[in-house]
Image (cartoon, rainbow, N blue to C red):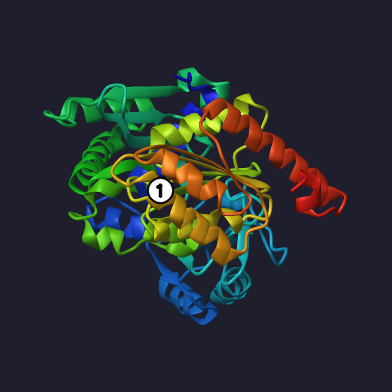
Amino acid sequence: MYRLRPFASRLTRVAQQQKRQLSIHEYLSADLLRKSGVGVPFGEVATTAEEAEAIANKIGGDDMVIKAQVLAGGRGKGTFSNGLKGGVRVIYSPTEAKMFADQMIGQKLVTKQTGAQGRVCNSVYICERKFARREFYLAILMDRASQGPVIVSSSQGGMDIETVAKDNPEAITTTYIDIHKGVTDDIARKISVDLGFSEQCIEDAKDTIQKLYKLFMEKDATQIEINPLSETSDHKVLAMDAKLGFDDNAEFRQKEIFSWRDKSQEDADEVKAAESGLNFIKLGGDIGCLVNGAGLAMATMDIIKLNGGEPANFLDVGGGATPQAIKEAFTLITSDPKVTAIFVNIFGGIVRCDAIAQGLISTVQSMNLRIPIIARLQGTNDEAAAKLINESGLKIFSMDDLQSAAEKAVQFSKVVKMARDIDVGVEFSLGI
């Protein structure tokens, strides 16, 4: 049994987050809040520069905000692929709304959360600019440790909450909620007072917190984050910005919300994998992994790390390691040009190892793969599987021992990478 190191533990959390949470755009979140009775600045979404101009005319006045609708944090400090800086801008006229919308829509916005590839902006949100006397942070989350909802709040709103947690952790308060009792008047009022709302806004803030919790429960949310939750200059409580996430397991109950999913904001390969019934997450290494079962997948990646290698992906084909699933998996893995070797680690239970081997051989032949593949197939008919692979004449190396297989995968990966660097044929470099 291999002990999971911190790498695998972090990957577990990544996989859980990807599986459990659908994110929606800010304008959709604002609409949900508005329908729930929560105060939000008036605004509408535009998909063209002309629509943005018309919405700005509708809002009226000379003080508005235009926000790029990209599912990533740090939009305000981001940079578009055309060089425009800032995905959140103050605008003072319909003409400016049109100008900035024209520069944002269709461009990729790069932020601290998107990576260098950025994410495409397909729409912009034009809304009123409200002036806040005070700004607070408030989020309702599901907490695994307490197995229930928590309200996280801070008087330091409008800031990156991770920075606040690092530099001033005592400024963050966590309130655990009994799911059977919900957010009572006393709980909501105490949070409002502790945050620092002025006396005339306490009841409004209390009602807002309770409405947010009701929305959280009714819509199967995993997260409702309001940053900032503001008290305006005319003493109104408004959610100035919102980030909402929803439990994937509740899709059958929340069909409307899940119809708002924007796949253009997700990794294209991960979307394709999900459509094929595969659990796939890109990583930064060069050894492709094809495994059945999340636990075995993490152990596989862990042992690759222990042997000095770096996994290129998390890919769990689940119980359906069929020839078609294997082909889809290989297509995803080899789409990453960094991949220099592939480690196939399958336990054949319901699906026989010889059937998996046949699918593996067929895939390698049809795709004309040139990189080495290390296959560890254990379980039903594993001896027959090894015989098929060994007699195939392909660059597939059948191994029984997990440690030896991992060593070989790392060794091959390093050799192929070196061969690429000096432009030597893979077959020559491997001696095959």
Image quadrant holding the N terminus, namely: top left
Q: Is residue 84 above or below residue 40?
A: below
Q: Percent x, y for residue 25? A: 41, 58
Residue at 53% from the left image edge and 56% from the top image edge: 330
**Percent x, y of residue 345:** 48, 39
Which residue is rendered at x = 56% and y = 58% of the image? 364
Tell me which residue sits at (22%, 60%) in the image. 255
- 164 left or right of 32 in image: right
Give how far across and how far down residue 396 sits, in percent: 59, 48
Q: Is residue 191 above or below residue 426?
A: above
**Kind of residue at disc 1:** Asp
Which residue is the site of mark 1?
354
Q: Is residue 26 visible?
A: no
Residue 111 in picture, x, y percent from top left: 62, 50
| Label 1 packing within 10 angstroms: few (<14), some (14-19), many (20+) | many
Using the rendered view, name the quadrant where residue 208 is placed: top left
Which structural element holds mark 1? Answer: helix
What residue occupies the far right of the structure in this picture? Answer: 422
In this view, the residue in front, 368 or 325, is: 368
Q: Is residue 158 visible?
A: yes
